[in-house]
Image: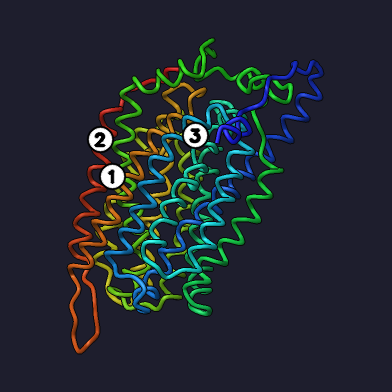
Amino acid sequence: MMKFFSWWKTGEDKPVITDKTEISKLYNRKRSSVIWSVVLGYGVFYIGRLTISVAKKPMMDAGILTPAELGIIGALLFYSYAFGKLTNGFLSDRANIRKFISTGLGVSALVNLAFGMTTNFVVMAGLWFVNGWFQSMGSAPCVVSLTQWFSNKERGTKYGIWAASHNIGEGLTFIGTSTVVAMFGWKMGFIGPGFICLIVALILYYTLADRPETYGLPNVADYKQDFSGGKHKKKSIKDFQLQVLKSRVVWKVGLAATFLYTCRYAIHSWGPLYLQEAKGFTIIEAGTIMGVNTMLGLAGAIFSGWFSDRFFNAKRNVPALIMGTLLTISLLCLQAAPQNSYIFNVAALGLFEFTLGCMVVYIGGLWAVDLLPTKAAGSVKGIIGIFSYIGAATQDWISGLLINNSKTTINGIESYNFDTAFIFWISASIIAILIPLTLWKEKPND
């Protein structure tokens, strides 16, 4: 393991290049490669962990797993993901991002391949727990890479573009995997994505980048002459990380993220089953509705950074309040939408995904990253990540129990009611709006 830590470690700084033309040329090439790599890479990370959401009903119908067991498996992934986010967030501040991310995605790919080859509940639970840990090597390192290669005034827009990548992954999973599962069975719903993740992991190893300084380039703030986040202070990474740990900002944003991610994964983990059981859609119809609407989440993520940068001077408080309120409204509409109605269900889910895309950017990290030292961006994302996915994990097993307890059997046909689960989900969305109001007047402290 120590050899791995040594291999993951960021490289030594090289002497700064003196030729400005060469600096500009290398910076532009690396920045371009970094942005499309983190978008592609993080999108594919989602394919490696959302497969189970699509396969739930076929696995239940085949008698492989019950809703309660699926909830436990999902919770195990999220709990390991949560604690992995914390650990790997702190490690990523010191890591060579190119090696770190490609390792996480590669191991996750192998776990998916193994998951599709077993039907034992205990083995499945163990594999998905391991998957959660290596899945956690995606988010924080991506944010670290963005802060290393893009300055403060660029960060909102670039962060929004990167955050949209998870919608690409979700869309591909819901549409593509549901089609694969419908045609070839639930096992191929894990084996196929596993091969995709493995190929992309190899690509990322060659296209991502270490810190600019390891290539002889100046710090991005100096390169862009952008000190809007404050002049760079001469502190160690450890000092910056301690500053983050002592900040009330990161803990408040993290608590808000707990409830936001409860809503997020309530729909993304149970949405396909909900559309089939409560709304009467087929697995392909449900997957298509989920997949198409995640593209609106992509639009929301891109919109969020530009919107707050352009109209609110890179402040996230007012935009977060607006989008959070609309998020709650969308959940109420989704519950009330009539059965078999594409228009109402797609509209409600579309509003949910768009506003969720915005809120994941604001509450999921950007607000705290803006207010805290960029040199410890991985630690910021790690702390928020553990809060976020404890919410997601707890939601999964609670939702599984609520749905399982609502089961009724008529003429040998089982059906499930989601009303109690929706009360739980909507309550979480309201709390996610209220907590950030305590951060209304906070200013950057780099």
Q: Amino acid at mark 2?
A: Ile
Q: Are marks 1 and 2 in contact (CB under 8 Å)?
A: yes
The quadrant in which residue 370 appears is top left
Neighbourhood count class around disc 1 (C-alpha, 10 Å): few under 14, some 14–19, many 20 upward: many
Q: CA distance from mark 3 to mark 2?
A: 25 Å
Among numbered discs 3 and 2, the one appearing first in the sequence: 3
User: Residue 109, percent across and down?
Assistant: 56, 56
User: Residue 320, percent across and down?
Assistant: 35, 39
Closer to viewer: mark 1 or mark 3:
1
Q: Which residue is mark 1?
A: 259
Q: Which residue is mark 3?
A: 310
Neighbourhood count class around disc 2 (C-alpha, 10 Å): few under 14, some 14–19, many 20 upward: some
Front residue of 329 and 158: 158
User: What is the number of the mark on residue 13?
Assistant: none
Please count the marks in the image.
3
Closer to viewer: mark 3 or mark 2:
2
Determine the residue positioned at 49% across, 74% down: 181
Relative to 219, is 314 above or below? below
- Left or right of 52, for residue 138: right
